[in-house]
Image (cartoon, rainbow, N blue to C red):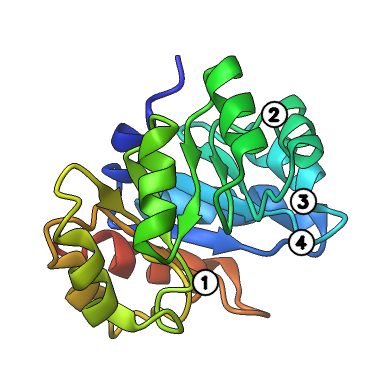
Amino acid sequence: MTPDIDTIMRMAPVIPVLVIEDAHDARPIAEALVAGGLRVLEVTLRTPAALDAIRRMNLVPGAIVGAGTVINEAQFEEAHAAGAEFVVAPGLSDNVARAASRLGVPFLPGVATAGEIMHGLDLGLTHFKFFPAEAAGGLKALKALAAPFAQCRFCPTGGITAETAPEWLAHPSVLCVGGSWIVPKGADMAQVRALAEQAAALAR
């Protein structure tokens, strides 16, 4: 049974945000990340290889593979058919939110304003991706947004680094952060595992 979004967000302090160019790289990357302690993996739908990458990563024991950059219902359906166990969106779409609710798929939509959070609450959502985290005002902005929404929890994503992640994770409304630094372009799997181990050890 797929965990709910709260459980998924609490599994590790960092969710790797992955742009997979070649599906053949997907399984080795997933194996290195899981071995390093990061089980929750977000494959962004930014490349033609993404859906195949999700299928291949699902074969890795312990991996919980989701689809990111889902911007419409058609993409949601494709990701769900490929086996995505959760869905992340850069913004809040009523159609995607309703599709996720209908099919029981954990959903993490992006928000950057109080109005978007209120809209999400109206749709029955309480967990959000704060995006783009740094460009939207950084930790100072999130603290201001989180104050009137004590029931909400966040995964800040966008511009966060290994150095700044601890500051974000120290805020009580933040359950995890999204990070693209875990799998640098051209990295070998030993390096990916080492970066995953460092990220998994970050305090919350």
Neighbour tally class for label 1: few under 14, some 14-19, many 20 plus, Cα within 10 Å: many
Q: Are marks 1 and 2 in contact (CB under 8 Å)?
A: no
Task: Give how far apart the Cα atoms at labels 4 and 2 are.
Answer: 16 Å
Q: Position of residue 154 (x, y in %)?
A: 31, 54
Task: Give how far apart the Cα atoms at labels 1 and 4 are.
Answer: 13 Å
Q: Are marks 3 and 4 in contact (CB under 8 Å)?
A: yes
Residue for badge 1: 180
Amino acid marked by disc 3: Ala
Between 55 and 135, the one lying in front of the other is 135
Q: Are marks 3 and 1 in contact (CB under 8 Å)?
A: no
Q: Determine whether the residue tagged by mark 1 lies in a helix, strand or loop.
A: loop
Q: Residue at x 59, y 16 (%)?
A: 102
Q: Quadrant of the C terminus?
A: bottom left
Q: Which mark is residue 50?
A: 3
Q: Determine whether the residue tagged by mark 4 lies in a helix, strand or loop.
A: loop
Residue for badge 2: 80
Amino acid marked by disc 2: His
Neighbour tally class for label 4: few under 14, some 14-19, many 20 plus, Cα within 10 Å: some
Q: Earlier in the sequence, mark 3 or mark 2?
A: 3
Task: Give how far apart the Cα atoms at labels 3 and 4 are.
Answer: 7 Å
Between 136 and 202, the one lying in front of the other is 136
Circle 3 or circle 4, nearest the eye: 4
Residue for badge 4: 46
Q: Quadrant of the N terminus?
A: top left
Task: Give how far apart the Cα atoms at labels 3 and 1 are.
Answer: 15 Å
Circle 1 or circle 4, nearest the eye: 4
Q: Earlier in the sequence, mark 3 or mark 1?
A: 3
